[in-house]
Amino acid sequence: MSTSLVRKSLDILGCDDDYVKRGRKKRAKKSEGVLDLIPANQRIHNNKKGKKEQNICPSRSKKIGIKEAKLRLSTKIDETDKNIERLLLLSGNRIDPETSEKLLKRALKRRYVLKETEPAESEQTAFTEEDFKQFEKEYQVA
């Protein structure tokens, strides 16, 4: 809001003018003179030994021409098609109901849900108890 709108709204409400005048005052900006006009990376400074040096900014990149810029842009690989394919693969991913149930159980309990172990069925063999007894007798004799 601008100050004029604030003053008008305070007049409508009937507030004191002292309240408006008590606001924050702006500080006067110090002018450092001509040195403010020179960018910091181009100023000449005295080093520790007293010699004058120019502060060279290493981050400034070399200027390139229009032809070189067009060449760089033309050789740059366009990855939008790859990104679209990946997004389509992610959106098409479907989770089977069993996995989604496991995820929901774990999310609700906020801990790892142990797998429910099914009771092991007794193993059926081709040999009978009589065959085992007969084998045991033969083994002990030999």
Image (tube, helix red, strand yellow):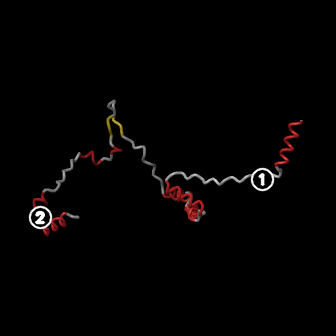
Residue lying at the far bottom in this picture: please name it: 12
Residue of label 2: 15
Q: Nearer the viewer, residue 85 or 43?
A: 85
> In 3D space, how far apart are the residues under numbered discs 1 and 2 (Cα atoms)?
96 Å
Label 1 crowd (10 A; few <14 / some 14-19 / many >=20):
few
Task: Let me know if residue 88 appears in the view.
Answer: yes
Q: Residue at x 32, y 35 (%)?
A: 46
For residue 16, side relative to residue 124 (left or right): left
Label 2 crowd (10 A; few <14 / some 14-19 / many >=20):
few
Task: Let me know if residue 78 appears in the view.
Answer: no
What amino acid does circle 2 point to? Cys
Dot 2: what SS? loop
In the picture shown, does residue 43 fall above or below 103? above
For residue 94, side relative to residue 4 (left or right): right
Q: Residue at x 82, y 48 (%)?
A: 129
Q: Residue at x 10, y 59 (%)?
A: 18
In the picture shown, does residue 130 fall above or below 91? above
Residue 112 rendering spot, x and y as whole percentages: 54, 51
Residue 70 rendering spot, x and y as whole percentages: 52, 59
The answer to which quarter of the image holds residue 80 is bottom right
The answer to which quarter of the image holds residue 138 is top right
Dot 1: what SS? loop
Residue lying at the far top in this picture: please name it: 49
Q: Nearer the viewer, residue 128 or 71?
A: 128
Residue 1 rendering spot, x and y as whole percentages: 23, 64
Residue of label 1: 124
Q: Quadrant of the C terminus?
A: top right
In the picture shown, does residue 56 fall above or below 89? above
For residue 127, side relative to residue 51 (left or right): right
